Image (spheres, rainbow, N blue to C red):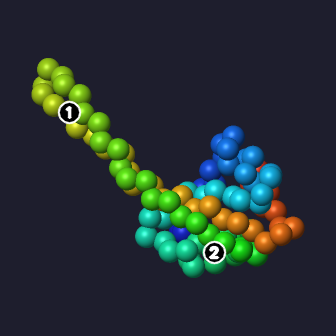
Amino acid sequence: MSVIIKPIISEKATSQADLSGLYTFLVDTKANKIQIKEAVEEAYGVKVADVRTMIYAPKVSAKHTKKGLQVGKTNKLKKALVQLVEGETIDIFATN
C-alpha cells in the first residue's frame, strides 16, 4: 500500500511550506497519522514534528437528460498537513 499519493501544489500550500514548514500531501484514505509520518520521513529523509489530516466526502452530482436522471460522484479524499521539525525542508519540485 502506497501511503503518499502525491504532494499538493497550490498557491496556498506553497506559501504555507515557505512560511511555516507545513507541507500538504494527498494520502491513502485508510492511512493513519503514524503511517503518514513514517512514509514522509522515509521518502524525503526529514524529521516530522506533527501530522494533521482532513477527510473530504465524495461529491454527488446529478443532471436531467433525455435518458433520465444521470448521477455521478467523485472519490473520497484524504489530505495530510505535515509539520516538519524546525530547519528541515522538502524540495517537492526536485526531479529524480
Does 53 appear above or below 33? above
Mark nearest the camera among 1 and 2 is 2
Estimate the x, y position of residue 43 in percent, counting from the top left: 69, 70
Image check: 35 left or right of 29? right
Q: Residue drawn at (43%, 53%), measured in percent from left and top? A: 56
On residue 37, the disc is 2
Residue 70 disc label: 1
| Amino acid at circle 1 | Gln
Residue 45 position within the rendered picture, expressed as x and y whole percent measured from the top left: 77, 73
Q: Relative to 88, is 93 above or below? A: above
Q: Is residue 16 left or right of residue 79?
A: right
Res. 83 image quadrant: bottom right
Q: CA distance from mark 1 to mark 2?
A: 40 Å
Side of 72 relative to 3 (left or right) = left
Name the residue at 45% across, 59% down: 55
The disc at residue 83 is none
Badge 2 density bin: few <14, some 14–19, many ≥20, Cα 10 Å: many
Q: Nearer the viewer, residue 40 or 94?
A: 40
95 is higher (above) or lower (below) than 62: below
**Residue 74 visible (yes or no):** yes
Q: Position of residue 76 (x, y in %)?
A: 39, 54
Name the kind of residue labelled 2 in the image: Lys
Q: Residues within 10 Å of mark 1 (few under 14, many from 20)?
A: few
> What is the residue that sits farthest to the right in this orientation?
87
Report the side of 29 relative to 2 (left or right): left
